[in-house]
Image: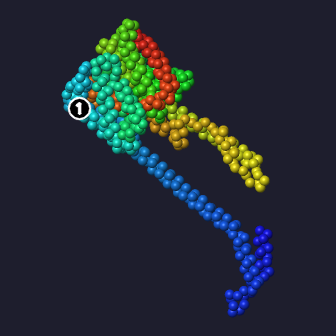
Amino acid sequence: MDNVRSLSRSGSQRPSIELQGFTNITTPSAVAASSSSNNKANAYSPYQQQINDDIISLKSIEQQNSNSNKKKNNNNNNTNVDEWRSWLLWWNTEDWWSVWIGLIFFGCIVGAVNHGIPQPEFLKWEHNPFLTFATIGNYGLIVIFVAMGLLLWLSMAAVRTPNWKQYPFGYVIVFFVALISKMLASNVHLNKASLGASIWAIIFGFVLRNAIDMLGKRLPGYLKVAQQTELYIAASLVLLCIDISVLRPLAPRALFVSWLDTPLLFMVIAWVGWRVLKIDRQTAIILSGATFICGSSAAIALGASMGVPHKSQMPIAIISIFTIPSIIALPYIAHRLEFSSAVSGAWFGGCVDSTGGVIASASIYGDKEAINTSAVVKMVQNVLIGPLSVFMAWAWSQYELYELRKFEREEELLTQQSPPEQTQQNDNNKDDNGSSIDIAIATIALDDRQPTPPTSTSKNIKKRDKAHVLLWKRFPKFVIGFVLTAVLFNTTIGEDGDRRTAINDFCFYVSEWFSTLSFVSIGLGLQLNEMKQNIRNLGMLCTLYILAQTVDIAITGLLAWVAFTFM
């Protein structure tokens, strides 16, 4: 700057003089002045360049802020549009499509029975597996195959599931695996061993998935999109028609057996799995509920209520495999303890996980009264899915909101404490020129005191979501379909007992098809490598199930004996 000032003074003392008539000729003083002016310009040019760069940078930042504001406004507008679209298209979600599919099938089944169309049936066979189709009603299996495929494909297309266009290819494979499973389950010897279609479906799905993994290939897109466990199970539950006329005579005692101990034992065993066995809280709740209520149906309902339906796959697989010993052993234990037919049936209905397993166990016992009593107790227990799903959706929503508020309070306290600490840190780290050193040091120090984030599901909750909104989002919509089919069945179907039984059995047949598809999907989701890596967690889950099932068998046996002996 001193050089610049000296040049400016020398230039001002020697002004330039132009000679008249010779404009291109300058005096030496003019030349010196011109040289001084150029030197001055050259001396100032770096500072001017810096100012220009700063101006350009500020304009760029201003433009970015403007674009950011426009983007925010567009995002807000898009958010408003999405909210309105979600309200207008409330019916177009996977949860609701299970209800629509179930209700459509219910209406078609009622029409088929009214027109005398026979129900398909897998006949028992011993040597020739194709004899299982030796009934005229099995022509309807072709119709069921097409109708299920079209409705499921329509639901995929409506909600824009990834790879939905490839669903028909995957559906054919999954349906074929389910068909083979049902054929094997109809074998006389395998049926006596209680190896039902659910077991074979899981095994075949597991073999298919791990064979693809052994070949070093990923699961194809058409099989991924056909792996719709939650949708299949939800549709099957909608078709579980509850016949009040059958429940009415035994309802008080059935309620005593199936509802008295279930809620308390469910919570106690879930707590043991979480606190003692160190199992993930949600998985422990799902496994406990599935053990004490109705197996896979309860597992899917609880998983959906907590927003983690994918965590229900392993508990369902464990229950499906480990329930076989109970199905076989309980009838012989009942004979050994000299239980009556009614007590035995109530015992089977209260502690065997699946509806099919209950009937199988009562059939092994070999008494019609035991079969009827077990079916009634199981149906009453199945009704518990609805209230338990609502309760769990509410309880978990409250828990997530509590965790989110706790996390926000910790962040707010940390934010309030951070400015003075950061200022002090900056003051203590000034260099000789007075400039602040990198404030990342303070940032790192603050990062070490960050609050623990909430759970994976709760951190996705929007701040504007109230408790009732979150409850509705978590609430499994198939419970509404379950209630609707029960109401329609008991109000629109006449008093003809044979007709009511035919409709109920037909609905149960289609419901079992959806269940078998879900078991194939569960098998496709079981990878041997992941199971090896999580062998400890698998062992803990098996331990929890054995504990829960042992407690359930003992308590339910006592309640069944009291209810059907003294009441």
**At 43% from the left edge and 45% from the top edge, which residue is drawn?**
86
- Residue 498: image quadrant is top left
Q: Residues within 10 Å of mark 1 (few under 14, many from 20)?
A: some
Is 294 situated above or below 50?
Answer: above
* Colour option used: rainbow
Quadrant into which the C terminus falls: top left
- Residue 106: image quadrant is top left
Seen from the viewer's position, the closer of residues 199 and 419 is 199
- In the rendered image, residue 140, in percent from the top left (x then y), is placed at 23, 32
Identity, as a three-letter code, of the amino acid under mark 1: Gly
Seen from the viewer's position, the closer of residues 371 and 324 is 324
* Residue sitting at the far front: 215
For the image shown, how many numbered marks are present on the structure? 1
- In the rendered image, residue 489, in percent from the top left (x then y), is placed at 30, 29
Seen from the viewer's position, the closer of residues 409 and 153 is 153
- Residue 476: image quadrant is top left
Is 31 situated above or below 519?
Answer: below
- In the rendered image, residue 159, in percent from the top left (x then y), is placed at 38, 43
**At 30% from the left edge and 28% from the top edge, which residue is drawn?**
180
Is 65 situated above or below 102?
Answer: below
**At 60% from the left edge and 59% from the top edge, which residue is drawn?**
61
The answer to whether residue 364 shows anywhere in this view is yes
The answer to whether residue 508 shows anywhere in this view is no
Quadrant into which the N terminus falls: bottom right
Residue occupied by mark 1: 140
* Residue sitting at the far bottom: 21
Image-based side of 288 in relation to 429, left or right: left
Is 174 situated above or below 46?
Answer: above
**At 62% from the left edge and 61% from the top edge, which residue is drawn?**
57
Q: Secondary structure at mark 1?
A: helix
- In the rendered image, residue 39, in percent from the top left (x then y), is placed at 73, 74
